[in-house]
Image (cartoon, helix red, strand yellow):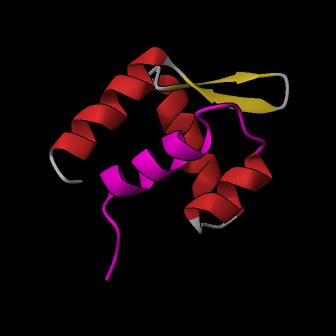
Amino acid sequence: MRRSRTAISVEILRAAMEGAKKTHIVYRANLNFEVVNRYLAMLEEKGLIEKKENLYITTEKGKEFQEIARELGL
C-alpha cells in the first residue's frame, strides 16, 4: 500500500524533531534521496522544516501540522 503525501511529510517531520541529517531522514522515513530532496524542499517552502547548517529541524508550525495529522489519524 502506498503512503499518502501527508503520511510521508509527517514521517519526515517526526524524524527531524530534534534535528537530523538528511541521511537519518532517508532511513527513518524509508525513502530514497531523490524523494527526500523533493519533500524537504516542499516542507521548507511551507515553513514546516528549516535547515541549520547540515541539520533539518521541525519548526513550531511543523509540530502543529504533525499534531493535527495525528489527531486525524493520518
- Direction from residue 50 to residue 24 in the image, left or right: right
Q: Position of residue 63 (x, y in %)?
A: 41, 27
Q: Name the residue at 32% across, 50% down.
A: 6
Q: Where is residue 68 in the image (x, y as percent from the top left)?
A: 23, 34
6 vs 20, nearest the viewer? 20
- Direction from residue 61 to residue 31 in the image, left or right: right
Give, as a single range, the part of the protein colored magenta.
Answer: 1-21
- Direction from residue 28 to residue 3 in the image, left or right: left
38 vs 16, nearest the viewer? 16
- Quarter holding the C terminus is bottom left
Q: Position of residue 22 (x, y in %)?
A: 75, 47
Q: Name the residue at 63% across, 60% down.
A: 28
66 vs 51, nearest the viewer? 66
In the picture as drawn, the residue positioned furthest to the bottom comes out as 1
Q: Name the residue at 70% across, 32% down.
A: 19
Q: Name the residue at 58% across, 40% down.
A: 40
